[in-house]
């Protein structure tokens, strides 16, 4: 499931990886990067990628971005808030970073895309014991399909012509609605559904249909930001080459 970011580390020996990572770090710090002008960094709860409820494990993408910030000497907190509020802030304020953001056609010209962080699968998920929802036509036949507000998942469902959509402010609220049988299925990244099904006390394994989309999670910024994507792409290369990405993926059980 690790994102396809070049995977330089997989073809290099340990000593070469460390040397290459050191050279990249020196380049990042020596360039006097504009990344030091970051105003705020915002996110919402999308466990296991971002998770404010855990005292020490704040999510895979949260930790990847935090490590990239450390490499660039950026001392800013990653702030958790409602996703709608995070999007509004990033849309209106220069040099505000937002994660995890899915890159879509509608968003392409709206944001500055700094770097890809992780790849995600999206499927229709239903309660244990349900029949799998494998097609859009099957989803259209349901009484209600739930997803989150202002999400790429919502945009996908609308583009496919679903009229039985119910929107929820967070993944946690979405999964609670599924547990309470207020909706028949959910549509969001599978990893979010699995994590929040457990968080709301759901028992048994969710039933996932065929994968509808494979999409990447990005770190993005307001379009008017004066940040350099190359700085962030270089930083994540460092984390790949020194083994940090692999360690974090293993820590969150997503390898």
Image (tube, rainbow, N blue to C red):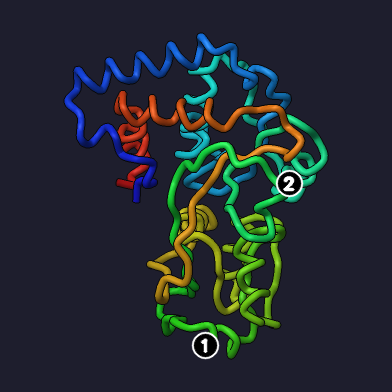
Q: Nearer the viewer, residue 117 or 169?
A: 117
Q: Nearer the viewer, residue 56 or 74?
A: 74
Tell me which label, 1 or 2, sits earlier in the chain.
2
Seen as rendered, the residue at the extreme left is 13
Q: Which residue is found at the position 42% from the left and 69% from the top?
A: 206
Residue on which the image places disc 1: 138
Residue 247, horizontal then vertical, whole percent = 31, 32
Residue on which the image places disc 2: 87
Residue 101, horizontal then vertical, whole percent = 60, 48
Q: Which residue is found at the position 49% from the left and 52% from the top?
A: 216
Horizontal side of 57 relative to 152 (left or right) equals left
Neighbor class of circle 2 (other Cα within 10 Å; few <14, some 14-19, many 20+) is many
Horizontal side of 254 relative to 32 (left or right) equals left
Q: Which residue is found at the position 65% from the left and 59% from the top?
A: 151
Give how far apart the Cα atoms at labels 1 and 2 are. Answer: 31 Å
Vertical side of 118 occupied by 204: above or below: below
Q: Which residue is found at the position 76% from the left and 35% from the top?
A: 224
In what element is the residue under mark 2?
helix
Neighbor class of circle 1 (other Cα within 10 Å; few <14, some 14-19, many 20+) is few
Q: Are marks 1 and 2 in contact (CB under 8 Å)?
A: no
Vertical side of 121 occupied by 5: above or below: above
């Amino acid at each position: 499931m690790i994102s396809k970011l070049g995977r330089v580390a997989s073809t290099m020996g340990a000593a070469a990886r460390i040397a290459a990572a050191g050279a990249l770090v020196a380049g990042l710090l020596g360039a006097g990067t504009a990344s030091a002008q970051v105003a705020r960094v915002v996110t919402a709860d999308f466990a296991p990628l971002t998770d404010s409820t855990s005292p020490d494990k704040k999510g895979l993408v949260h930790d990847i971005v935090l490590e990239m910030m450390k490499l660039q000497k950026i001392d800013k907190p990653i702030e958790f808030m409602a996703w709608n509020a995070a999007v509004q802030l990033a849309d209106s304020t220069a040099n505000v970073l937002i994660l995890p953001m899915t890159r879509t056609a509608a968003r392409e010209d709206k944001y500055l895309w700094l770097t890809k962080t992780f790849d995600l699968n999206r499927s229709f998920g239903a309660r244990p014991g349900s029949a799998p929802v494998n097609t859009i036509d099957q989803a259209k036949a349901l009484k209600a399909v739930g997803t989150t507000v202002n999400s790429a998942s919502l945009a996908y469902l609308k583009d496919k012509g679903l009229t039985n959509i119910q929107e929820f402010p967070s993944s946690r609220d979405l999964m609670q609605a599924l547990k309470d049988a207020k909706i028949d299925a959910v549509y969001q990244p599978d990893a979010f559904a699995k994590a929040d099904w457990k968080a709301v006390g759901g028992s048994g394994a969710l039933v996932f249909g065929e994968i509808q989309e494979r999409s990447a999670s990005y770190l993005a910024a307001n379009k008017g930001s004066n940040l350099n994507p190359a700085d962030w792409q270089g930083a994540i290369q460092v984390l790949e080459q020194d083994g940090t990405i692999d360690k974090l993926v293993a820590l969150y059980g997503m390898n």
